[in-house]
Image: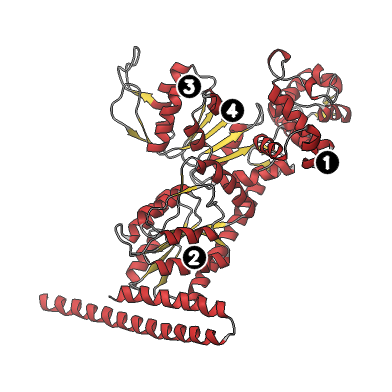
Amino acid sequence: MSGSETDTNRNHHHNPLVSPHTAQRDLSPVGTEVVVGKMMAAKSMLAAIDKAEANLLNLLIVDDERVIRDGCRDVAASIGFTTFLADNAEHAFRVLDAHSVDVVLLDLRLPGLNGLEVLREVKRRRPETIVIVMTGFASVQSAVQAMKHGAYDYVTKPFNLEELRLILDRVLGHLQLTNENRILREQVKSKEGFGSIIGRSPEMEKLYRIISKAAHSTHPVLILGESGTGKELVARSIHYSGPFRDKPFIAVDCGSLVPSLIESELFGYVKGAFTGANKSKDGLLTVADGGTIFLDEIGELPVDLQAKLLRALQEKEIRPVGGTKPVPVDVRVLAATNRDLETAVQQGTFRRDLYFRLNVLSLRIPSLRQRKQDIPLLVGHFLERLARSTGVQRNISDEALKLMLNYDWPGNVRELENCIERACALSSGTTIHTGDLPTQIQNWKEQSNPTQVPCGARGIVPISEIEKRAILSAIDQLHGDKLEAARLLGIGKTTLYRKLKEYGTIQ
Amino acid sequence: MLHELANVFTGILITSGLLAQSLGDSDQARFAQSICELGERGSGLVREARALLIGALALELNTSGESEG
């Protein structure tokens, strides 16, 4: 038994997921590296996206022998794996909970929990994780048992460098093939986009890659995007592309529920909890057990319920209204908002700890004006869908499409969908002309002055929106030269990059 | 004991292999290579001992089964 800080420190050398300068680390005397603390969410969010982009694979090595852990780590890192080390079962589970692990190299003989039990638990928590068992007994029985419990392969100790390399190479090949198959399946599923999401612009392709990665993780995801961009569609895609697609997907709009009802809806209640509670009712978190709950407009959740939700996420149990006994729940949370949650945190209207908890992985859906090249595809899709329900196949004139391409679409895809439905209803023939489009589109003049953008209630434009427009417009005019944009805008380049990160235009 | 020996030799084989690799064609690499070879010999002995032990255990089980029968 030799887990030590040395493991942790050395592992940093290979592990781009953790910056030793910024993330707090668990430096308990174990051979495990687990990122903890409030910095974790934001850091791992960026790291997760970086990882998705770089397509790195994570390997967890579980062995109580330090020399074996170190050796395996060096070999795996040379092949291209990002490695995590654990010297016992408990720490292996902590790593599994904190990171998206693709492969586990597991010693069957560990202190405490038996290796087969660890294998079972790994497969329960992460069914898609590949487990290679290392066995010192070499009995056919232990290997057969391991394979029966879902191990991908086994290697008998003592093994040498080449044997280890061979088996890791094989896994790498298997994972690459699986990934290619997954991408192909997703492409076959929809030529127009990803699942039910329509779009082929580079912004959307990037989003699909992140969705695909998020789907195969179990961490919470914070989905950001303007109203009408399709946040629920993205949440559904994450759920239905993942390993728990057969489990429930429950969507809750926190913004449309009366605050007093949200608690009983989410957490359920027991008989007699309040007037009218004639019988107990399961909350939506319980209904979604084993699957996913999508909390739309999470920013609207009252602060007291934020604390209760945080407890549910941390403790994996809830307490129904009026109940005394906690009810265990195992549910993945996807949350969405069009509000700036960081500002809400600063203003004290959103709990910082919940924000970090939800923001483990975050993705931003581009607005329609950021991906105007998708408009013809979307128009075609909506016309096709309407044709199926009405039996009338319509098309659109070039002039009408040109007007639609010029328009800014503050209501995003939802507004485009409504526009097409309305135009089809008004159109007398099978072609939609400019006159069939809403007047705001017909009269739209391309905006050059950001203060003229009609958004916000009663035409009042929030300062943050004007600022955003000014920054994005400057960068656009300067063909992406951010330093020059910062200089001309009179702000520091650090501020500019921070703002761009907030807008989700850079990672 | 055999399990521990298997762990010891795995450690020796992997680290000496990595060492030999990092030393390239230098003279020291020969020493590392020697450790690898000795590690392989030791590992062979562990495997042999294990096979003997498994054989002995199977024999013991069979014998006790016969005497009970």
Residue at 42%, 77% (x, y): give it: B12
Horizontal side, residue A235 vs residue A492: left or right: left
Q: In the rendered image, which quarter contains the C terminus of chain A?
A: top right
A9 shown above or below A166: above
SS at circle 3: loop
> What residue type is disc 2 on?
Arg
> What residue type is disc 3 on?
Pro
Give residue A251's position: percent from left, percent from top.
52, 30
- Identify the image quadrant of residue A438: top right
Which of the marked residues, 3 or 4, is nearer the chain's N terminus?
Answer: 3
Real-space CA distance between mark 3 and mark 4, rounded to the nearest whole angstrom: 16 Å
Q: What residue did someone put label 2 on?
A: A73
A448 shown above or below A27: above
Q: Of residues A210 and A500, which is closer to you in this image?
A: A500
Q: What residue did someone put label 4 on?
A: A343
Which of the marked residues, 2 or 4, is nearer the chain's N terminus?
Answer: 2
Q: Dot 3, how many residues are within 10 Å of its Cα: few (below 14), some (14-19), or many (20+)?
A: some
Res A302 label: 3
